[in-house]
Image (spheres, rainbow, N blue to C red):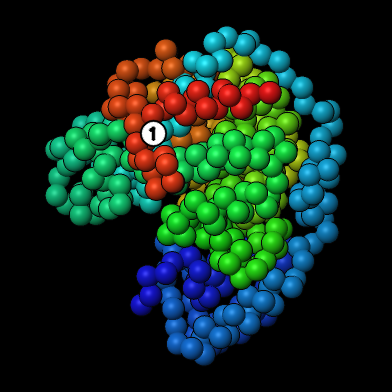
Amino acid sequence: MSGLTWVQAPDLLAHEIVASVGEGKEVDDVRRRWLAAGGQEDAPRDGLGQEGDHALRSLAEDLLRELDRRDPPAALTRLEPDDLAAIEATRPVPPGHTGLVGDLDDRLLGAWLGRAAGCLLGKPVEKIPRHGIREILTSQGRWPLADWFTAAGLPPDVAARWPWNRRSASTSLAENIAGMPEDDDLNFALLALRVLEAHGRDFTTDDVAAAWLADLPAGRVFTAERVAYRNLLLGESAPRTATVRNPYREWIGAQIRADVYGWVNPGEPATAAAFAWRDARLSHVRSGVYGAMCVAAMCAQAVVSDDVDDVLEAGQSVVPPQSRYAEALSAGIEAARSDRDDEQALDALGDRFAHLHWVHVLNNAALMAFALARSEGDFGTAICLAVTGGWDTDSVGATVGSVCGALAGAHRLPERWVAPLDNRLASSMPGCDGIGFDELAARTARLLP
């Protein structure tokens, strides 16, 4: 079986059927043809679940093209437009937020460090569901999560049942951490920084695409980004790069790429969201794009505010209010403000979004909002809740860490979360391997308007 994941036609079709149902498309005829030919309907949890013979792959290609030709119902696109002007028109009042500008340089460094620490905390348990994370920690007497993961004291049967993410354990368990290891959640922040440095505040989606092809190895991108990368190589341009045979178009990928667009627009969430839209439309539509806009807006507000509710309001203000994404944010915030304890609240969110893949944007957005609201902005509490929730642990940990790191500023971040980073980031991005977070914060500051 080929190791080229996330782009095999049979697996794309399984995910596309799920995505099309979520958009309200008619798929019953496609499903019947696929199952009759021996295809599997269950979408793989990872990138490769079925490959099939030539005939099955050929049928999958045909059915993917058929579903691509089917538009979502008008009722959905009216509430969830893709065009920036149409998105902005859904807002009842143009967002305008002011904050308490303190030491902005310290806030920017806190944001970079927070993003790295939250990502690093979640890396060993990426792909492990929440009940597995709980079993690991309970078996070690370390539940609830309050510190880095470790293999020390982990019973062999639990380790076998819930193996660490094999790409990450050697660099992200407490006993192995020596600086921040490479991760796509940080690579995309580096890429956004380089795009802004090269092209300024008027950068375009084509500039982002060119930067991907120049600086990002194809093996370092996944899900929607890998499909968009493939589409670029086949000669497509945005926004078709986001829609051609791309069942991951409403997954989390664009949401993890947006922080820098917020940091360079302090106190201007609407402008930050517009920057993020230009980036996100390369690979995502609707909820996937709104995730990027929301995070950019929150990051713009986090570097000037001391109130996490103000940050959440900024994120909510830039997405269509009747969209599924807005509903997911509200679900997370409502769960956080309920009288349920953390476990009960996370169980409720898990039940509500159980139908979605662990890398989808909606469930992870709800978890992000929950962790921010329940923690009231406390850094350690927030990243631990984000990771405890399961799903895309390193990505949600990174975003929540970014927001809370900016709210606190570097000088107030707990040493136990910052010291292991050793002011050093590993990366395959050209010229960035081993770069210091202090240098990254300084370069970000030079991009401020």
**Which residue is at a point 59% across and 47% down the rendered structure image?**
254
**Which residue is at a point 69% across and 77% down the rendered structure image?**
66
Residue 299 place in picture, x, y as percent: 59, 28
Residue 446 place in picture, x, y as percent: 58, 24
Q: Which residue is mark 1?
A: 435
Please say whether residue 429 is visible from this viewpoint: yes
Amino acid at pointer 1: Ile
Q: Is residue 321 left or right of residue 436?
A: right
Q: Nearer the viewer, residue 6 or 150?
A: 6
**Which residue is at a point 78% across and 44% down the rendered structure image?**
84
Q: Quadrant of residue 319?
A: top right
Q: Quadrant of residue 30?
A: bottom right
Vertical relation: 25 (above or below) 361: below
Q: Is residue 332 left or right of residue 205?
A: left
Residue 164 place in picture, x, y as percent: 27, 49
Vertical relation: 346 (above or below) 213: above
Mark 1 residue crowding within 10 angstroms, few (<14) / some (14–19) / many (20+): some
Vertical relation: 361 (above or below) 42: above
Q: Quadrant of the C terminus?
A: top right
Q: Nearer the viewer, residue 263 or 150?
A: 263
**Which residue is at a point 72% across and 19% down the rendered structure image?**
97
Q: Is residue 241 left or right of residue 415?
A: right
Residue 159 place in picture, x, y as percent: 20, 49
Please say whether residue 23 is visible from this viewpoint: no
Q: Is residue 206 left or right of residue 343?
A: right
In the rendered image, the residue lying farthest to the bottom is: 55
**Image mark count:** 1
Q: Quadrant of the N terminus?
A: bottom left
Q: Nearer the viewer, residue 274 or 121?
A: 274
Q: Nearer the viewer, residue 38 or 256?
A: 256
Q: Secondary structure at mark 1?
A: loop
